[in-house]
Image: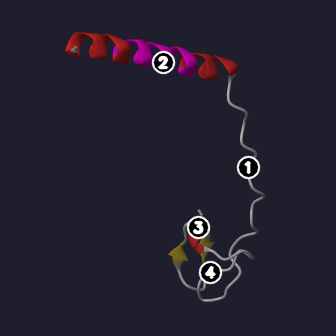
Amino acid sequence: MPFCPACDRFYNPNTLDDGGDCPEGHHVADPEPPAEVPPVPWHFKLMLVFVVAYLGWRLVQLIGWLL
């Protein structure tokens, strides 16, 4: 968490501007490069397929029960 000694405050990295300056204009921290988003695991995609299939089947059973 960046600290600005001139303002005597801690700042959330989201409140700093693109250059790493506090709202008063003092340089606080160097901006960090954006983090890479890891790819979605294959087993998560497989789980989503099974969940959609299960809920689809339960919907078919509900429609059959209502009729």
Indicate which disc residue 22 carries. Answer: 4
The quarter of the picture where residue 18 lies is: bottom right
Q: Secondary structure at mark 3?
A: helix
Q: Please tell me which residue lies in front, 6 or 32.
A: 32
Q: CA distance from mark 3 to mark 2?
A: 36 Å
For label 3, the crowd category at 10 Å Cα-Cα, with few meaning under 14, some 14 to 19 and many 20 or more, is: few
> Looking at the image, is mark 4 or mark 3 nearer the viewer?
3
Q: Secondary structure at mark 4?
A: loop
Q: What type of secondary structure mainly makes up the magenta span?
A: helix
Residue type, label 1: Ala
- Residue occupied by mark 1: 35
Q: CA distance from mark 1 to mark 2?
A: 30 Å
19 magenta-colored: no
What percent of the width, then of the height, locates residue 13? 61, 66
Residue type, label 3: Asn
Q: Are marks 4 and 3 in contact (CB under 8 Å)?
A: no
Q: Are marks 1 and 3 in contact (CB under 8 Å)?
A: no
For label 2, the crowd category at 10 Å Cα-Cα, with few meaning under 14, some 14 to 19 and many 20 or more, is: few
Q: Magenta segment, which residues?
A: 48-58
What percent of the width, then of the height, locates residue 51? 48, 18
The quarter of the picture where residue 62 lies is: top left
- Residue occupied by mark 2: 51
Q: CA distance from mark 2 to mark 4?
A: 46 Å
Would residue 31 be found to the left or right of residue 47 on screen? right
- Residue occupied by mark 3: 14
